């Protein structure tokens, strides 16, 4: 009996599927082929938009099914390694391991995006991010090159280089003990503060581990530097994905971080998030409705997208 790609059993007898007396060895998830550098884009619609639309109008645009699907297509195309898409896009140097919608404090609307990109270079990350449908809709008068420059501009605080700390004790399941939330802390930029962050690094991670709340976390670094070339590069902020039962609990959690208590952060923001399934397999036509809806899965499979887990194992 052999388990093949797509979880299809190679046997003729349904009763032979009992694995109780067998040892099943699962290979580790392979690393992304583009995992040279990791970047996060934090785009707040009201700050980023250049069209003059109101918050209500921006949310209406975001919640449109066709616009949601355009974002999923954009993210999923970067993760594919099948012939159908590669013939059209070439050998991309970027993939999107996760994408989340940032929620308003009252949880009644989406106000922005948190997008993670694996990329072989900053130029590759900026080039692909500048094609994201929501970002394009908010900057319609910019050329592609101008949009890349706008995303890189420190004033927008849109794109950061992120060093994801891959510690087993900092990998809680998303939403298992509360609502998935993101905390973004940006430091006061000075040599004295940078030294203080370095001194508090161990205490910071010990606090996060003890909390048993963290989904993923890591420091933010300057875009123009490369960690592989400059391992002593000093961080200027922190991104923490974690679970919290309420917004109040989330705020208390990030404000009790040793980096916050000691004044390292200049700004500290907290947003609960909606997970966007960038596989395209489980996106409902109305994300605020209940019940399954396979329309996206069927449409993307029809168009030649890799919609099964075994086709893109590094994104599971």
Image: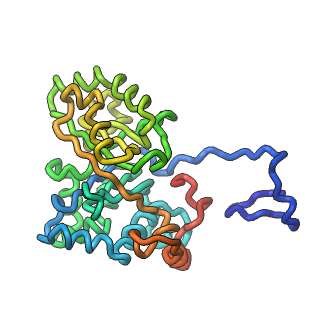
In the displayed orientation, state which residue is furthest to the left: 52
Q: Quadrant of the N terminus?
A: bottom right
How did the renderer colour the structure?
A: rainbow
Q: Residue furthest top?
A: 199
Specify whether residue 39 is in view.
Answer: no
- Quick one: quadrant of the C terminus? bottom right
Identified at 57% across, 47% down, the residue is: 30
Given residues 119 and 221, the one toward you in this image is 221
Residue 116 against residue 91 in the figure, above or below = above
Residue 248 found in image quarter: top left
Residue at x-position 33% and y-position 59% = 101
Instruction: From the viewer's side, name the closer residue of 110 and 291.
Output: 291
**Is 51 placed above or below 17 here?**
below
- Please indicate, yes or no, whether residue 234 appears anywhere in the rendered image: yes
**In x, y percent, where is residue 67?**
34, 74
| Coordinates of residue 122 in the picture (x, y in percent) | 31, 50
Q: Quadrant of residue 115?
A: bottom left
Q: Whole-percent x and y of residue 283? A: 46, 69
Q: Relative to 301, is 237 on the left or the right?
A: left
Q: Residue at x 50, y 72 (%)?
A: 291
């Amino acid at each position: 009996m052999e388990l093949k790609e797509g979880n299809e059993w190679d046997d003729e007898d349904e009763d032979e599927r009992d694995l109780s007396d067998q040892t099943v060895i699962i290979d580790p998830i392979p690393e992304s082929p583009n995992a040279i550098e990791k970047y996060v884009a934090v785009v707040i619609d009201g700050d980023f938009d250049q069209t003059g639309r109101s918050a209500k109008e921006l949310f209406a645009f975001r919640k449109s099914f066709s616009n949601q699907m355009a974002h999923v297509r954009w993210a999923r195309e970067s993760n594919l390694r099948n012939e159908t898409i590669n013939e059209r896009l070439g050998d991309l140097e970027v993939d999107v391991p996760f994408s989340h919608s940032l929620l308003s404090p009252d949880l009644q609307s989406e106000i922005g995006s948190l997008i993670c990109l694996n990329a072989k270079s900053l130029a590759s990350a900026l080039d692909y991010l500048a094609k994201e449908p929501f970002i394009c809709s908010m900057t319609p008068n910019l050329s592609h090159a101008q949009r890349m420059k706008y995303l890189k501009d420190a004033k927008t605080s849109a794109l950061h280089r992120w060093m994801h700390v891959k510690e087993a004790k900092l990998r809680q399941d998303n939403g298992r003990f509360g609502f998935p939330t993101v905390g973004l802390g940006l430091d006061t930029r000075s040599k004295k503060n940078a030294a203080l962050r370095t001194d508090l690094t161990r205490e910071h991670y010990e606090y996060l581990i003890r909390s048993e709340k963290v989904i993923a976390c890591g420091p933010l670094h300057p875009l123009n530097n490369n960690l592989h070339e400059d391992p002593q590069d000093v961080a200027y902020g922190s991104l923490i994905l974690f679970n919290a039962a309420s917004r109040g609990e989330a705020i208390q959690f990030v404000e009790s971080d040793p980096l916050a208590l000691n004044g390292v952060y200049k700004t500290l923001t907290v947003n609960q998030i909606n997970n966007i399934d960038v596989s395209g397999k489980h996106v409902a036509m109305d994300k605020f409705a209940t019940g399954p809806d396979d329309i996206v899965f069927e449409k993307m499979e029809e168009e030649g997208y890799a919609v099964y887990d075994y086709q893109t194992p590094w994104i599971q």
